[in-house]
Image (cartoon, rainbow, N blue to C red):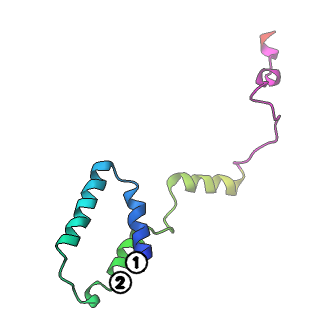
Amino acid sequence: MNRAEIEQAVLTEIHTLPLDKIEATLNFVLSLKNNPVKKRPLGLLKGKVDFALDGMYNTKSTPTEGEKVLAILKKTGYLGSMPDATDLSENYKDYLDWGDKA
């Protein structure tokens, strides 16, 4: 990952945090600026940041239980739709069968 991708990943995650966690993150970043970390040889970190972030942002996840059921219903034909009146939500009583109420 390059710098821009890492910055975007950090911003994406920060937007999900509550305010107190965001303030703590800001304080941590400011402490890094005031007390720089000793630089390590690049070889020690090579590939580790990419691996960690790929695990968090992996778009090829296993399907959820609901997604599995939906796929089975679509495959077997039990899931579908039928054409209906466009004004059904407004005039649904006109479409009800009142035969048993007579």
Give the left or right position of residue 63, taking residue 54 as reference: right
41 or 101: nearer the viewer: 41
Residue 96 part of the magenta-drawn span: yes
> What's the residue at 73%, 47% (across, down)?
80
Give the main secondary structure of the magenta stretch: loop
Give the left or right position of residue 96, taking residue 14 as reference: right
57 or 11: nearer the viewer: 11
The residue carrying pointer 2 sits among few (fewer than 14), some (14 to 19) or many (20 or more) residues within 10 Å by Cα, namely few
- Determine the secondary structure under disc 1: helix
> Mark 1 = which residue?
3
> What's the residue at 80%, 16% (across, down)?
98
> What's the residue at 40%, 78% (across, down)?
3
Q: Is residue 79 above or below residue 68?
A: above
Q: Quadrant of residue 41?
A: bottom left
Q: Which residues are magenta?
A: 78-100
Q: Earlier in the sequence, mark 2 or mark 1?
A: 1
The residue carrying pointer 1 sits among few (fewer than 14), some (14 to 19) or many (20 or more) residues within 10 Å by Cα, namely few
Image quarter (top left, top right, bottom left or bottom right) of the N terminus: bottom left
- Determine the secondary structure under disc 2: loop
> Mark 2 = which residue?
47
91 or 97: nearer the viewer: 91
| Amino acid residing under circle 2 | Gly
Give the left or right position of residue 22, taking residue 86 as reference: left
